[in-house]
């Protein structure tokens, strides 16, 4: 494993030139380069160490600890938003009937189907949050991915009839012109 540099270490990067490490996390260095200003580079990036600062380095940032704690709580706390199904569908059955009468129909409790739709919606929301919080994605990539997610929501608006509350329904792109 490569040595983790302390704040104040001086490096020479093949793309950015000479610079000084101004912040450190487990995976990234914030380096102020003489000719290129502030850049973030991976700790395992290729560069020459001119002078390594021997300060103790906290290799886990507060942000990373907080994010890990949030993720653990979301995963294990057992609490999620309660999303009720519309009253008229409670206890109902969804029937898939093939056009060929020789083939069997498939019945699924609507509550089970609705639960899967809600899980899909929640996972799209998590993906949206991860995209928006990403430090690695360029802003244009975030916009492009966000548009795909919005289109996914739009494709799922058919299932809004199942939701009791309008505020919990899928919303796609607005058709205002």
Image (cartoon, helix red, strand yellow):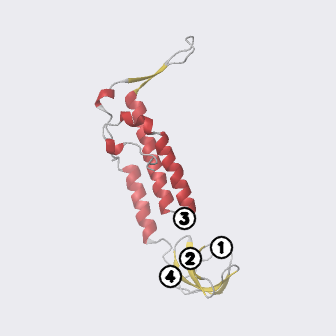
**Residue 2 appears at what percent x and percent y?**
64, 74
Q: Residues within 10 Å of mark 4 (few under 14, many from 20)?
A: few
Residue at x 51%, y 54% (from the top left corner): 146
Give the alpha-carbon distance from disc 3 to disc 4, as whole Å.
Answer: 34 Å
- Does 119 appear above or below 3? above
Give the alpha-carbon distance from disc 3 to disc 2, as whole Å.
Answer: 21 Å
| Between discs 4 and 2, the one toward the N terminus | 2
| Between discs 1 and 2, the one toward the N terminus | 2
Q: Residues within 10 Å of mark 2 (few under 14, many from 20)?
A: many
Query: Which residue matches tag 4?
Result: 56
Name the mark nearer the viewer: 3 or 2: 3
Q: Splitting the image into 4 quarters, where does residue 91 fall?
A: top left
| Between discs 1 and 4, the one toward the N terminus | 1
Answer yes or no: is residue 45 visible: yes
Judged from the image, the secondary structure of the residue bearing numbered disc 3 is helix
Give the alpha-carbon distance from disc 1 to disc 3, as whole Å.
Answer: 23 Å
**Residue 166 appears at what percent x and percent y?**
32, 42
Are dots 1 and 2 in contact, CB under 8 Å? yes
Are dots 3 and 4 in contact, CB under 8 Å? no
Residue at x 57%, y 60% (from the top left corner): 141
Q: Splitting the image into 4 quarters, where does residue 38 fall?
A: bottom right
Query: Which residue matches tag 1?
Result: 45
**Residue 71 appears at what percent x and percent y?**
42, 56
Answer yes or no: is residue 116 visible: no
Q: Residue furthest right?
A: 14
Give the alpha-carbon distance from disc 1 to disc 4, as whole Å.
Answer: 20 Å
Query: Which residue matches tag 3?
Result: 139
Judged from the image, the secondary structure of the residue bearing numbered disc 4 is loop
Judged from the image, the secondary structure of the residue bearing numbered disc 1 is loop
- Does 135 appear above or below 117? below
Query: Which residue matches tag 2?
Result: 29
């Amino acid at each position: 494993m490569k040595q983790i540099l302390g704040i104040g270490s001086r490096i020479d990067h093949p793309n950015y030139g000479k610079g000084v490490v101004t912040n450190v996390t487990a995976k990234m260095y914030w380096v102020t380069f003489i000719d290129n200003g502030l850049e973030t580079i991976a700790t395992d990036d290729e560069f020459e160490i001119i002078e390594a600062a021997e300060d103790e380095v906290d290799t886990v940032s507060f942000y990373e600890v907080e994010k890990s704690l949030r993720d653990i709580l979301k995963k294990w706390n057992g609490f999620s938003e309660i999303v009720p199904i519309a009253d008229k569908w409670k206890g109902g059955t969804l029937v898939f009937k093939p056009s060929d009468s020789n083939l069997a129909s498939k019945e699924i409790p609507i509550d089970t189907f609705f639960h899967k739709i809600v899980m899909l919606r929640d996972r799209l929301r998590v993906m949206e949050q991860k995209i928006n919080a990403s430090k690695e994605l360029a802003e244009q990539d975030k916009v492009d991915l966000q548009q795909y997610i919005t289109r996914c929501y739009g494709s799922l608006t058919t299932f809004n009839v199942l939701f009791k509350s309008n505020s919990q329904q899928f919303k796609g792109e607005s058709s205002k012109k």
